[in-house]
Image (spheres, helix red, strand yellow):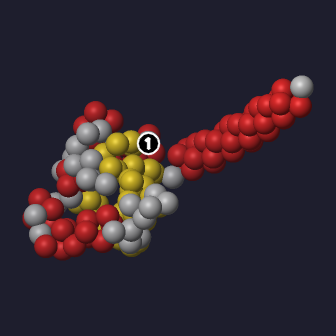
Amino acid sequence: MSFLNKRKQELQAALEKLEATENRVMELEADFQAIERSVALLVLTRDGLVDKVNDVFLDMLGYQRDQLIGKHHRVLCDSDYSRSEEYIVFWRELVTGNVKEGRFSNINADGQQVWLDARYLPVVSDQGIVKRIIVLVNNVVTQ
């Protein structure tokens, strides 16, 4: 009988842990949704492909979602810059976990150069491997 009681306690503890985890996930999803509603957001794979883009970002630069999803980040950059050593170094630093913050030149949907105040935030696993890069854009800057 003590075996069944012990097993029941273990199951109860596991259920409580699962419930706490589910609650934490819901909190994090709510936090992310709040950010997504108010800040231009772009999520890139570690290879530089656009994985997710929110409406604020699309409206800011005039793109449609299907123009960016699955495309490389370089579609948002001047072609000379995207072929430069500077761009290679920029990505090398991101995939090694370095945050990049500042004013970045981008190309909007009309092909015009715009400057964005942005932060590129590498998301690093517990093994130290960059899994994705979250880009938060504060605003478009006129120069």
Please name whichever residue, 26 or 64, is drawn nearer the observer in this view of the structure: 26
- Using residue 8 as the reference point, say whether residue 133 is left or right of it: left
Please name the residue that numbered disc 1 is placed on: 54
Residue 108 lies, with reference to residue 30, above or below; the image says below
Residue at image coords 33%, 69%: 96
Report crowding for label 1: few under 14, some 14 to 19, many 20 or more residues within 10 A (C-alpha).
Answer: some
- In terms of depth relative to the viewer, which is nearer, 143 or 88? 88
What x and y, as percent, mark residue 32?
58, 47
Q: Tag 1's secondary structure?
A: loop
76 up-or-down from 25: above or below: below
Say which quarter of the image contains residue 102: bottom left
Residue 114 vertical position relative to residue 98 in the rendered view, above or below: above
Instruction: Locate residue 44, reporting x and y percent.
Output: 34, 50
| Residue 5 placement, left or right of 118 | right
Residue 140 visible, this angle: no
Q: In which quarter of the image is the C terminus?
A: bottom left
Q: Where is residue 132 in the image (x, y as percent from the top left)?
A: 38, 53
Q: Which residue is drawn at 38% across and 59% down?
A: 130
Task: Please state if 129 lies on the left or on the right of 14 as rendered.
Answer: left
Please report the residue visible at 39 percent of the width from the left and 42 percent of the height from the top: 52
| Residue in the foreground of this view, choosing between 122 and 138 | 122
Provide residue 104's location: percent of width, then percent of height. Answer: 31, 67
